[in-house]
Amino acid sequence: MTAVRVLFVTIPWRSHYHLVVSMGWALQAAGHEVRVASGPEITDAMTRSGLTAVPVGSDEPIMEKLEKLLDADVLGKVEELTEQGDLLVDMCENREEELTWQRLKWAYRMYKRTHAAMNDSMVEDLVEYCRWWKPDLVIWDYLSYAGAVAAAAVGAAHARMPIGLNAEARMRANYLRVRAQQPLEDREDPLEEWLGGLAEKYGASFSEELVTGQFTIDQMVGSLRLESDVPSVPIGYTPYNGPSVEPDWTRRDPSKRRVLATFGISLEQADWAQALSNEQLQGMLDGLADLDIELVVTLPEKIQKELKRVPDNTRMVEFVPLHVIIPSCSAVIHHGGIGPFLDSIAHELPQLMVGRVLPDIGERGPRLEQAGAGLWISGDDPGELSGERIRERVVRLLDEPSFREGAGRLRTELLAQPTPGEAVRELELLTSRYRSR
């Protein structure tokens, strides 16, 4: 196929960008022209990945944009809805009796506000760039709707890349189903209003493709995925942790069983991104202190300094590349990030996921347990994340062979999925099918 132009779009969040890099490498290695676009705050991360960056939008940090949304009215509504406010952070609710119109309406009003805060400043620059560069395919991270709008404005094919399970697509289907049951005068759709307004500004119109993508590129293990009517291109997982160095201490086999505890690079940016509070982190360390293991914990220096005790069996580091450390481990504890989740599967390791930081975790946690490859503690009750409970789960993962066997089955499945390079031909065909320019 003649070389095509491919533009990747992500919100300015490093971990989201890292997950599209391997597909960018594959397309570039196949002879296609590749550009990566996001907010200026991650321009350095983009250029250091070896791909050509296109900074778009304002340089106001994304965390500041999101924090402005937490005004008194919003916080009051969250308190009013109490437990039902979890639709804002856990999009896996699928019980019909829980998905009331009142609850869904308010959640989608907030989705519109948060998505707009993350995307709006990028749209004009993206459209202007696309009108000049004329991409054939736009691939956008699952929260980066600015990419879908820009693609529609110039007639490019466009694909959405979910990070974990595609829970947003199922929630959207539920929203449209419940909306259709309401009186005509009460059928608001905040996402259609927002995306439709942006599309019309640039000569396009709203369709559900602006929400779902014309097709998806999905690196989740096939048996764990949610069903979807949107065409999907499966790919295997290729780790990328940003520029990194292999530390001296990782260059030899551990003398004891090694357990990694890692909770994501987002901890540097926001306290609310913590899966475990500082008190719960201390409880985890104390709970694992008497085990004959080497516990490696990655935490920002600021949080390390707030801990009262670090046991003798614990090595505390700010960062270590996951693909470097995980092969030497016997188990992994993490917050549900797709990096440690898929890296653990790729190396046949049992894993313990903790908390509800990520929107698909309410489905991915139970599916991991059903596959026999690990355990999940939701932390809905803060007491669930006690050091004693984490210790009990870690001991099971280390001592019960069935967990490694379950992880091995998922590993076989993951390795059978096409590599990003092997998926390029399918992307070329889909680009020809969906491109309208």
Image (cartoon, rainbow, N blue to C red):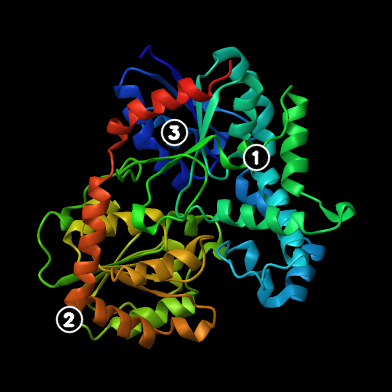
What residue would you read off at disc 3?
Answer: 46
Q: Amino acid at mark 2?
A: Asp
Q: Residue 57: x and y, percent? A: 64, 32
Left/right of residue 127 with respect to residue 223 in the rendered view? right
Q: Could you give the CA–CA distance between mark 2 and mark 1, rounded to whole angstroms? A: 53 Å
Label of residue 292 in the image: 2
Left/right of residue 331 with respect to residue 203 in the rendered view? left
Q: Residue 8: x and y, percent? A: 48, 31
Label of residue 29 in the image: none
Q: Is residue 33 above or below residue 402?
A: above
Q: How many marks?
A: 3
Q: Is residue 364 visible?
A: yes
Residue at point 36%, 88% (across, down): 388
Residue at point 10%, 61% (across, down): 253
Q: Is residue 63 above or below residue 79?
A: above
Q: Nearer the viewer, residue 87 or 332?
A: 87
Q: Could you give the CA–CA distance between mark 3 and mark 2, rounded to whole angstroms? A: 41 Å
Of the residues under marks 3 and 2, which one precedes in the sequence?
Answer: 3
Closer to viewer: mark 1 or mark 3: 1
Residue at point 20%, 64% (across, down): 329
Query: Where, by quadrant of the figure, is residue 422 drawn?
Result: top left
Residue sitting at the far front:
181
What residue would you read off at disc 1?
Answer: 208
Q: Residue 165: x and y, percent? A: 46, 55
Residue at point 16%, 53% (across, down): 248
Residue sitting at the far right:
185
Of the residues under marks 1 and 3, which one precedes in the sequence?
Answer: 3
Categorize mark 1 by other alpha carbons within 10 Å: few (<14), some (14-19), many (20+): few
Closer to viewer: mark 2 or mark 1: 1
Q: Nearer the viewer, residue 215 or 184?
A: 184
Left/right of residue 409 with respect to residue 51 in the rendered view? left
